[in-house]
Amino acid sequence: SLTKEDDGSVKILSEGAYTEAKGTQTMTFAQDGTVTIGYTFIVNDAIKINPRQWGMTFMLPASYQTLSWKRKGRWSIYPEQDIDRNEGTAQADPVHLQGVEAWHKPSGPWSSDANDLGSRDFRSTKAGIYFAQLTNKNGAGIKVLSDGTQAARSWIDGNKVIFLIAQYNTGGADAFSAGFYSGERRPVKAGDVLKGSVRFKLIR
């Protein structure tokens, strides 16, 4: 359904169902050029997962390989090339490898090591974002605006770039840190509600 609000914005409400969940999505187009997508989905009884993250993903053409961000970090100062720094810009610079990691002597900072998904800097999660944006060489792209409670993660997937805006995010999922972060995990079960919103604008 489509409605026009008193403030001049236009709202579109739609329903959807996936294998994992079903629910509603509302897209609000504001007069200032921003778009807000709100979603509420109820998990069905066909899945049992323990996610590290969940949220909304955008799929962009593979040419959108520049990530910029500003976030609310745990510390006020980070090393200049730390993937966890509070603000910065990262290039995808993907490298095709036979495995997940390359066996070679590093020629640059750890953050620039790359595989098919992009560099570590590009594909790492940026938690607590105020904004995160993906752009192409011409500066066109998408800029997500937040309040320091969401996380952003991007990676290359074949001929497209995936841009995840996570409403729920934990510190880690690998075997080394799983025990440390286990207290943050919230397994998803039937009837759980996954709810959030993403506010963004297109950059031209």
Image: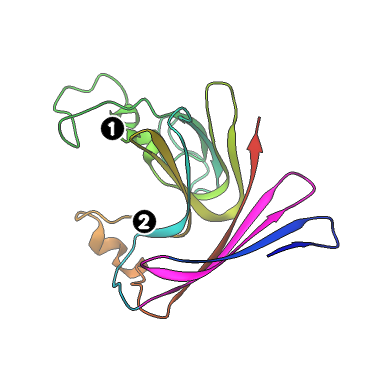
Pick the residue in front: 42 or 102. Answer: 42
Q: Is residue 111 left or right of residue 134?
A: left
Which label sits in the foreground, 1 or 2?
1
Give x and y (percent) for residue 106: 22, 23
- Name which of mark 1 and mark 2 comes first in the sequence: 1
**Direction from residue 25 to residue 80 in the image, left or right:** left
Asked whether 161 falls inside the magenta stretch, the response is no
Locate the C terminus and report the quarter of the image it occupies: top right
Q: In front here: 159 or 33? A: 159
Disc number at residue 152? Answer: none
Number of numbered labels in the structure image: 2
- Magenta span of residues: 18-44
Q: Secondary structure at mark 2?
A: loop
Tell me the distance, in whole angstroms, between the alpha carbons under discs 1 and 2.
23 Å
Residue 29 lies in magenta, yes or no? yes
- Residue at (28%, 25%) from the top-left corner? 95
Q: Amino acid at mark 1?
A: Asp
Q: Can you say whether 70 is above or below 55 in the image?
A: above
- The residue under label 2 is 171
Kindly indicate whether the residue at mark 2 contacts the one at mark 1 (C-beta within 8 angstroms). Answer: no
Q: Residue at x 29, y 29 (%)?
A: 113
Q: Residue drawn at (17%, 22%), measured in percent from left and top?
A: 105
- Is residue 41 visible in this depiction of the protein? yes
What amino acid type is highlighted by mark number 2?
A: Gly
Q: What residue would you read off at disc 1?
A: 116
